[in-house]
Image (cartoon, rainbow, N blue to C red):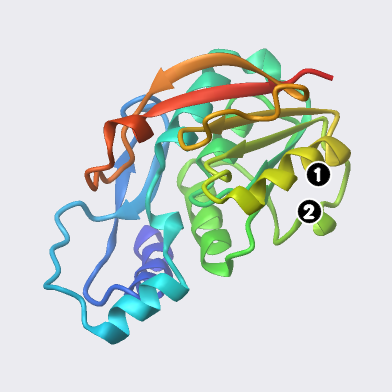
Amino acid sequence: MLQTIQSPLDHALQKVMPDASVVQTSLPLSKQIRLWLLDPLFHHDPCSSEESAAIMNNPPYWCFCWASGQVLANYILEYPALVAGKSVMDFGTGSGVVAIACMLAGAKQVVACDIDPDARRACSANAVLNKVELTLCASLDEVPWQPDLLCAADVLYDLENYSLLTQFLETAKQVIVADSRARTVAPDLYQQIEVREATTLPDYGEFDEFKRVKIYLSSG
C-alpha cells in the first residue's frame, strides 16, 4: 500500500529532478508526524539547462518540510486548544504538515489548500501516512466552509504575497502565520507571539537567519 502511494510522488518529483525519490521521514520537533520527503541521500550531478528550467518553473516545494511549517505544526501540537473542535484551513499546505498537526490536535475538520496539484497529491499521501482525513482545495475561493482558524507557514517569501495577510482575515475568524523570511508582518493586524528555531528537512544548507521562525496571531 505505502509503495503504491510513494510511486506517484516519485514520478512527480522525477519530472524536475531525475533519479530523485521520496522516503518516509519523522520530524525532529514532532516525532509523531511522518512525511514523504526528498531522500536526503539523493545526489545529483550539476543540472542541465533543461533540468534547471524545469525546477525553476515547477519547484517541488512539497518534498521539503520547511522550517516554518515544522515550527507551526509543533506549536499547534503543544497548544491543541488553538484548533480543538474547530474548522481549520491550512493555506499553502505544501507537504501538509500543519494540516496534519491540526487534525492530530483535535480539529473538527481541516481543508489543505495549495495551488500546486503535486503538493495536493503529497498532502493526500501524507494524510494517509498519518491516518488522518483532510479536504483538499486549490485556492481560497474553493474553501467549502468558513474556517474558524486559518494557518499559513512559509508563504511570505515574495513581497507580492503580503496582500494575503488581509485576505486571510476576510476568510477566517482567526489567523496564525509562521514565517522565517518576513522581517515584519502587518503589526496593525498581527501580533508576534513566539520565536522558535528549526531546520528545513532535508537540510539543504539554508542561512541561519532562515532557521529563526516567528509566529504571528491575528489581533482582531
| Residue 93 % position (x, y) | 58, 48
The image quarter in which residue 104 lies? top right
| Residue 213 % position (x, y) | 45, 27
| Viewer-nearest residue: 116 or 192 | 192
| Residue 181 % position (x, y) | 47, 37
| Residue 200 % position (x, y) | 33, 40
Q: Residue at x 64, y 45 (%)?
A: 133
Residue occupied by mark 1: 167
Q: Of circles 1 and 2, which is in front? A: 1
- Mark 1, other Cα within 10 Å: few <14 / some 14–19 / many ≥20: few
Q: Is residue 134 visible?
A: no
Whether residue 59 sits left or right of residue 202 in the image: it is right
| Viewer-nearest residue: 214 or 130 | 214
CB atoms at circles 1 and 2 under 8 Å apart? Answer: yes
Q: CA distance from mark 1 to mark 2?
A: 9 Å
**Element at badge 2?**
helix
- Number of the label disc, if any, that sits on residue 140: 2
Q: Residue at x 31, y 42 (%)?
A: 201
- Number of the label disc, if any, that sits on residue 51: none
Q: Residue at x 53, y 60 (%)?
A: 119
Q: Quadrant of the N terminus?
A: bottom left
Q: Is residue 80 above or below residue 136?
A: above
Q: Residue at x 36, y 70 (%)?
A: 13
